[in-house]
């Protein structure tokens, strides 16, 4: 090719110099940089990924600089390492990433909720301009609390247990862009994660558990407390349906989960495959469920046509399932009225595991009962030593001391 003949990717153009106002010659390079996926909106409101061609375009003062740029970019494209300038915004890439997730609806909703602060603060920003500083500032703001959610509400302070997963999801979005050649590096990997603070886990003693179960007989939703102290998760209690329970056979099947996602109650499958389990009913739990069934039948008859589906075992007087947070609030009130320590609802599950452990139930069996895949996790997380166990340990030391003295 002759020196004076430009390749088709380079055009010699005339433009107005902004400083002098005079016509000047520039060399514009346009290179095909492959394809990229862009989110598009369907009429029903859902999104899909549309594949479009990507071009890299720049202008240079000299033909030499233009040819050098063309050679470099062509080589990068051929080797699959070119990152073209992109007008995609943070909001667009988040939506595209979400559209490509093949996960449960509840999981996708959780991803969407985690990305909301990033999209709120930096959604309109071109993603290639997103820096570590932007993410550091976002983490600081979320940890402090008070960031606006709507025109009339603000976020509570986020804990490390919420911030770190958010950063991991942002990192997954950016990693996807790096793999596509749309981003040079993942700045989320540069952001320090916050030290995790384990919440203080408290459990009932045997006497406190008995006290709570006695109170549960007088509480309209007392059967929920029986289920909690039987080791069910909050979402499993809220999601349990009458069709999941065979009172005659004395078995309940844990198959459903009702969780809070972005403030909304969402029904879905259980947390993991091992969470699906069939548990035998104890006589106390059977009696509590029978009483609840009879009470709901009376409430249904009283409400008539106004009664709701009534499919959930734990529901309001009109047959509607509770929001999980509502059940947590009811639990705190119940603890206060029962005269027992106001532990978290999830700590009732800890109580079940710990008391089973004190009764010498094998860890593998406790793990299966709770729906864990890993017995070591059960031992590490749930087998606490409450005051009753410490007293037994002290008595054993005293016994050994007495034997030594004799």
Image (cartoon, helix red, strand yellow):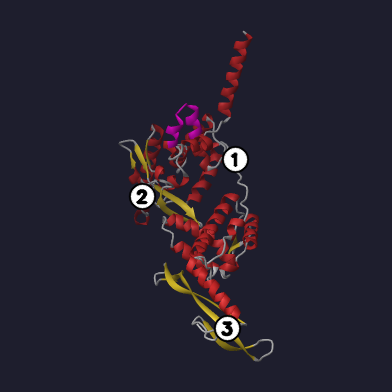
Residue 265: x and y, percent?
46, 55
Of circles 1 and 3, the one toward us is 3
User: Residue 305, can we see it?
Assistant: yes
Q: Residue at x 66, y 86 (%)?
A: 18
Q: Which residues are magenta?
A: 353-367
Label 1 packing within 10 angstroms: few (<14), some (14-19), many (20+): few
The residue nearer to you, when weighing 78 against 375, is 78
The circle on residue 200 is 1
Point out which mark residue 311 bears. 2
Q: Along the line of sight, which residue is nearer the eye, 236 or 102?
A: 102
Neighbourhood count class around disc 2 (C-alpha, 10 Å): few under 14, some 14–19, many 20 upward: some
Which comes sooner in the sequence, label 1 or label 3?
3
**Pointer 3 or 2: first along the chain:** 3
Q: Position of residue 314 (x, y in %)?
A: 42, 46
125 left or right of 365 in image: right
Please say whether residue 315 is visible from this viewpoint: no
Q: Nearer the viewer, mark 3 or mark 2?
A: 3
Q: Which residue is mark 3?
A: 27
Mark 1 to mark 3 CA distance (whole Å): 66 Å
394 over 340 or under it: above or below: above
Q: Residue at x 53, y 36 (%)?
A: 380
Q: Position of residue 199 (x, y in %)?
A: 59, 43
Q: Quadrant of residue 48?
A: bottom left
User: Does residue 90 sit above or below 328 in this rendering?
Assistant: below
Report how far apart the C-alphas of labels 2 and 1 lie in the structure.
Answer: 35 Å
Please state which of the two labelled residues, at mark 2 or mark 1, is closer to the viewer: 1
Q: Residue at x 51, y 42 (%)?
A: 346
């Amino acid at each position: 090719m002759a020196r004076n003949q430009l390749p088709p990717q380079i055009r010699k153009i005339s433009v107005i110099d902004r400083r002098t106002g005079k016509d000047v010659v520039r060399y514009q390079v346009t290179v095909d940089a492959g394809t990229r996926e862009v989110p598009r909106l369907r009429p029903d409101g859902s999104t899909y990924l549309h594949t479009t061609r990507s071009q890299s375009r720049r202008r240079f003062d000299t033909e030499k600089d233009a040819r050098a740029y063309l050679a470099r970019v062509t080589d990068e494209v051929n080797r699959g390492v070119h990152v073209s300038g992109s007008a995609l915004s943070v909001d667009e890439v988040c939506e595209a990433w979400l559209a490509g997730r093949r996960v449960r609806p509840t999981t996708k909703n959780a991803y969407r909720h985690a990305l909301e602060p990033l999209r709120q603060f930096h959604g309109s920003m071109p993603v290639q301009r997103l820096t570590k500083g932007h993410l550091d500032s976002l983490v600081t703001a979320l940890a402090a609390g008070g960031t606006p959610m709507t025109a009339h509400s603000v976020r509570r302070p986020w804990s490390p247990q919420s911030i770190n997963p958010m950063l991991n999801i942002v990192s997954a979005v950016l990693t996807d862009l790096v793999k596509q050649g749309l981003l040079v590096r993942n700045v989320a990997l540069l952001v320090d994660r916050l030290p995790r603070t384990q919440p203080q886990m408290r459990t009932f003693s045997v006497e406190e558990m008995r006290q709570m179960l006695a109170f549960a007989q007088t509480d309209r939703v007392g059967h929920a407390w029986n289920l909690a102290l039987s080791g069910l998760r909050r979402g499993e209690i809220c999601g349990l349906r009458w069709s999941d329970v065979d009172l005659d056979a004395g078995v309940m099947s844990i198959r459903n989960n009702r969780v809070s996602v972005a403030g909304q109650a969402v029904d879905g499958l259980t947390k993991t495959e091992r969470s699906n389990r069939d548990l035998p009913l104890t006589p106390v739990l059977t009696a509590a469920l029978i009483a609840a069934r009879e009470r709901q039948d009376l409430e249904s008859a009283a409400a008539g046509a106004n009664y709701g589906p009534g499919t959930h075992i734990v529901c309001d007087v009109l047959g509607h399932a509770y929001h999980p947070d509502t059940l947590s609030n009811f639990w705190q009130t119940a603890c206060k009225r029962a005269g027992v320590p106001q532990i978290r609802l999830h700590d009732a599950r800890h109580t079940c595991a710990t008391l089973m452990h004190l009764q010498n139930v094998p860890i593998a069996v406790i793990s299966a009962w709770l729906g864990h895949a890993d017995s070591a996790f059960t031992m590490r997380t749930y087998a606490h030593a409450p005051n009753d166990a410490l007293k037994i340990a002290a008595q054993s030391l005293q016994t050994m001391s007495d034997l030594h003295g004799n």
